[in-house]
Image (spheres, rainbow, N blue to C red):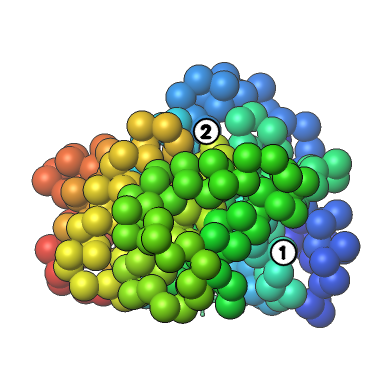
Amino acid sequence: MVTNRKQEAPQEAPSAERRRIAVVPGPQSPAVMPAVQGDHALETVGLSVFYGKQAAVKSVSIGMRRKAVTAIIGPSGCGKSTLLRCFNRMNDFIPAARIEGQVLFQGQDIYARDVDPTEIRFRIGMVFQKANPFPKSIYENVAYGPKINGFRENMGEIVEKSLRRAALWDEVKDRLTSSAFALSGGQQQRLCIARALAVDPELLLMDEPASALDPIATSRIEDLIQELANEITIVIVTHNMQQAARASSMTAFMLAGDLVEYSPTKDLFTNPKDERTEAYITGRFG
Ligand SMILES: Nc1ncnc2c1ncn2[C@@H]1O[C@H](COP(=O)(O)OP(=O)(O)OP(=O)(O)O)[C@@H](O)[C@H]1O
Ligand SMILES: [Mg+2]
């Protein structure tokens, strides 16, 4: 059940604690659970996000298929990043953001009172548009997550495995102690992916991960996404429709906070159900 808490919302930007309490929904709908336990790693139910009084995401209900790539597309400002940030509670860091509805991960409401958001962010990793390595060595960037999670043993193996999974190992294996800033933009982005993978997330969120990269680096990231999707669930926000078409099996099209259409990628790009989707993919707006 999704409760409408709009009227109860405080007018001023709520504190993190009040916001956390405000989003606790009612009992989970029995209708939702079977889908989550089946195909979907992550599901939202009537999810809205407000910045102050303005709704940036409007009652979105969507399921992300397990071990598949889901793309989210739509014009600038339509709410893609806002929606993505709800999936691992990154919106907690934005004081003005307030959430209604539910986000269920492996059937669990990630906004429930007893959920530790830090643990959620380990299980659901995130990679941003601009590579953001820490001012540390390549090795220390990758070892960071496991270390703060209490891992002490086999760190070298964890670092190597993560760099291999991010298709970066061969390029950096002889200079692991060099600064991460000495890497190219595309390498830095793969380092950030390796850093996210080092804690073995079940789901990886990517917000325009290749938009700052050249075509070769972009294609490496796309290949990597394909490989990773054999093991984990991936949600990617992209402005690049060719990239969505190449990389994903399902695509969501958003417009002004609404989820307009959610279909198998092939269908959405060749035979869209909604005329607004068609207008967007044919370049008539956005
Ligand atoms: N921290 C914030 N405070 C207030 N409003 C915000 C904040 N972040 C985003 N918004 C607003 O929410 C709406 C959706 O923004 P969002 O960043 O989610 O869009 P987007 O689809 O990711 O756009 P882009 O493709 O340009 O990255 C926009 O109107 C934006 O101005
Ligand atoms: Mg964005």
User: In the image, 233: left or right of 49?
Assistant: left
Which one is in front, 136 or 265?
136
Q: Please say whether residue 91 is visible from this viewpoint.
A: yes
Which one is in front, 112 or 208?
208
Residue 61 position in % (x across, y down):
51, 43
Q: Is mark 1 within 8 Å of ligand 1?
A: no
Residue at image location 69% in from the left, 40% down from the top: 153
Residue at image location 62% in from the left, 46% down from the top: 155
- On the image, numbered disc 2 is attached to which residue? 41
Residue 26 position in % (x across, y down):
79, 38
- On the image, numbered disc 1 is attached to which residue? 92
User: Could you classify mark 1 by the number of other residues whose Cα lies within 10 Å: few (under 14), some (14-19), or many (20 or more)?
Assistant: some
Q: Amino acid at mark 2?
A: Ala
68 relative to 205, above or below: above
Q: Secondary structure at mark 1?
A: helix
Q: Secondary structure at mark 2?
A: strand
Residue at image location 72% in from the left, 64% down from the top: 92
